[in-house]
Image (cartoon, rainbow, N blue to C red):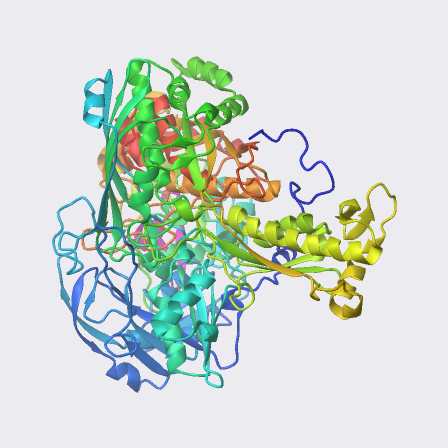
Amino acid sequence: MKPAPFDYVVAASPREAVQYLADVEDASAKIIAGGQSLMPLLALRLARPSLLVDINRIPGLETIERISETTIRIGTLVRHRMLCAQTNSPLLHEAARWIGHSAIRTRGTIGGSLAHADPAAELPIVAVATGMVIEVMGPSTQRTVDAQDFFIGTLENSLADDEMIVSVISPLPERWGFAEYTRRHGDFGLVTVAAAEVQGEVKIAVGGVGSKPVRMLESEGLVNDSVTLSGQLIDQAARAAAASVEPNGDFHGSARYRIGLVEELVRRSLRQLGSGQADSEVDWS
Amino acid sequence: MTEITGVDPKGNESVGRAVQRKEDYRFLIGRGHYVSDLRLPGTRHVAFLRSPLAHAKINSIDISSALEADFVEAIFTGESDPFKSVSLIARSALPSYIETAQPILAWDKVRFSGEPIAAVVATDRYLAEDGVELIEVEYERLPTNVSAWSTPAEPLHKEALDNVLLERRFQSGDVEDALAGAEVVIERELISNRQGGNPLECRAGVALFEPGDGTLQFWSGTQVPHLVRNALAELMGMSEAKIRVIAPDVGGGFGTKAALYPEDVAICMIARLMPGTPIKWVEDRAEHLLSATHARDHRYLVTAGFSSDGTLLALKADVTCNVGAYSVYPWTAGIEPLMAGGLLSGPYRLENYDCMVRAVATNSSPSGPYRGVARPASVFAMEAIMDEAARRLGMSTIDIRRKNFIGPQDIPYKMPTRLVDDSGHYERCLDKALELFDLDQFLEEQQRRRGTNEPPIGFGVACYNELTGLGRAASAGPRMPFRTGHDACTVKVNPDGTVTVFSGVTSQGQGLETTVAQIVADGIGVDYDDVQVRIGNTDESLWGFGAFSSRQAVIGGGAAQLSALVVRDKVIRLASELLEIDINDLILRDGKIWVAGEVEPRLSLAEIARVAYLESNRLPDGMEPGLEATRFYDPIRGAFAAGVQIGSLEVDVSTGEIRILKWVCVEDAGRVINPAIVDGQIAGAIAQGIGGAMYEHLIYDGDGNLSTGTLMDYLIPTSGEIPEMIIGHLQFPADNPLGVRGVGEGGTLGPNAVIAGAVADALGILVDQLPVTEGAVWEGLQ
């Protein structure tokens, strides 16, 4: 369980980092930030990059700034524990608390989590539910990608080989709900649900049921078409969600069980969203 | 035996107190010394090529491109000597046992995914792993079988065409007759889940062959250094005098490190082939999950008959244990099935018993000893039967157990398997556990919740006996060529009056340095702080079988006590001569000699030791210099330790989530040497048992690939999953010098039965298969 040989460079700026990526002929360079997903893949030799570009020492990427009344910009190197500590977005605070264990949260970064594109990870699900916009840089380009379009499949994103995430624009939802079921404290969720209302529109994203976070379009329609979020409507939306997913089963839980969890966790997240009390439920400690 | 009650110890003895552990300070400041901490100059690292296939013929192994790599120093395969001519053959004289051979490095055939095939030596582990990737093996796949109760597709060993390595029937009374007369007959099929010990420190070894004097030193994270030395000498054709095995600090074992593995032998052989070069192998977690011993993969087909008053009349069982690809060395494939059949009826009186047990080889990692050996599964099976009989008879699950307990009046009780129970204190354990659990309050709350929307709650109970400290008459293991009933201990008073102990026990974190020091301190009559204990070195201690079967407090502790008493006698005899006072008037206490009734001591132990070592002119005629004794101890039989666990849980019916509410354990540890260590053993064992009951499951797919190959999929509980525990003790001294009973394993025996029983109580769902996961609970509710 030791990585195959690779070269290692420390980048001083995003531009330098992506230039390193571009300069590698076999296009197998990788950015390393917190390393919480990449290091195990390296150790198991499931990832064999020829070059690791360390971006941890690039200044300015570890900040959260309020850019408008309803949005924040989060630097790619912002650690999960900083998401836990910030007070702008209670939803991000809550979701980040569910990520791994404290050692993982201390190192892992938002850019790393999004780029890694694990379909069960918390931040990609929140990104899709809140409609985050991902700011991407290449050697000669700068562009933005909607979270919805960023995730392509399991551990697959839409970055070109020479691009990196620099920051994300994160809308602050008016109301939100978050529910996750893990077998143990700190595990990836068997099913994770984020529901967020941004500018009056509710989106629901579910993780653990496909190769990327999956939007519950029918449930969203039910919720968005209704003036009030009654218990009956929530049940209806939860059932619609369950009916729309086709998860794979494994030894952690059968497909049927995961569908059952989708129903229950969509119900819980919508109740939390509907209660409007999500903010006050946050444990800020 | 009378129960020890009130304050113990009564005087200033060390035994009975939670003294500061000798080990803790060095661990806490980061100065523990494990095998991987050993950094000898010129060390070379080994990485093993492991089979990616579960069952295949090896047509060829091509190491040519690996040998061309400049970073590869050496490659060894099983095709050539010395590897080819040596194999691990676990021996037993049981008539139905079939001996099979485990190669050091597989060369003609691989039998499980993860089996070592080649060893690559390089200056560091990274390069060694790079070298492993350059080896090309041509395999020819063979049909694979990972289940012990499905029809075998292809024999693993030519000696056992049906893959059955051992079959034994335990028979007593007339089961069919008794079943015919039973009011209620219960039939169940119960399956327990494959698990592994997963100590924090995986396996590790450093081997150094010294060309100057032809000696082999082997630092190994083993639980059994003397057995390892004995086996290495035989396997390598060396004299035992030229082999030294050292087990330094070891980070957990749980039985996993009580086996001698092919990798151990391989690195010793490589060391001999590369004289003067330290050869190091530190197992990583992926290797551990794949190739260290597994356990607990069993199926129980049980039929039991009860009379209308709940009396257990007959028990009939067919037990199949998946023993993996090889018969674990030196314990044999019999270790789990024989334990399962030998103790299935547990703490219950039984006359009519008919139990067939078998060990079946499959294409999976070999099964070996794991804390509790077989009984977490067999207790689960037996207690499921008791619970269901109670339901069928309309009795409480508590009453039916009371009805059937072996009691103090039955002692010594000969079980139908001829094991002799010397305890019988099960009902006392149960009473105390019920009191600590507060069953009435629980039942009231359970009743209150019925008909509300609150999560349903249930409670489960497990009653068991742990056969500990086995002497020669009840020795662990199936008629192996050695009897593990004894250990030796040397106690030496140094010239300055301090004490050094060379004990045959080993420690993997359970504090044996402390425990032995407490025993010796009291045995001689010196301060605990003045006793140093050295363990885990075959050149220092005379003999010890090591850590398994909850034996060391009883056997190693007994040897320490006996040796200490001999030394104490000599000290008093010498003091008597020096003081010219009758030995019967002298007391050795706190390292000083007192005359009975006097306020001030007459001599210090240091003064006496000085005479013994430095002033032989003052020794009485005929007395040898020195203050030292070595004694063996063998308890002949074993000491049964009674135990009861009761737990309650609530179930979130929408997700199947189980939340443990309360956990109580009461065990009879006999006389407790160190209460903190005993409680730690019990709590740790329960935590491990809960892991097995709810989370830990080694799963192979149909092709024999391990699906749970990392700790992301093999779920070990964290402190977040383990409840607070209430631990109570009974102290009925056992019949050995210290009155102790083993407590190392008992805690693992309860959780399967408690969780399964509590889920059944809460939801009315019968648990037939472990682990009890939220998914299984949820499915059961649909």
Q: Is residue A130 magenta?
A: yes
Dividing the picture into quarters, in which one does residue B235 lie?
bottom left
Q: Residue sitting at 40 percent across and 17 percent down? A: B399
At which x and y percent is residue B619? 77, 64
In depth, the one of A15 and B123 nearer the eye is B123
**Residue B604 appears left or right of B665:** right
Residue positioned most to the front: B621
Residue B493 is at least partly visible in this image: yes
In depth, the one of B572 and A10 nearer the eye is B572
Number of marks present in the image shown: 0
**In this picture, which residue range is highlighted in magenta?**
A129-152
Residue B696, placed above or below residue B41: above
At which x and y percent is residue B272? 39, 79
At which x and y percent is residue A81? 53, 50
Residue B104, placed above or below residue B677: below
Quarter of the image with the N terminus of chain B in it: top right
**Residue A102 appears left or right of B163:** right
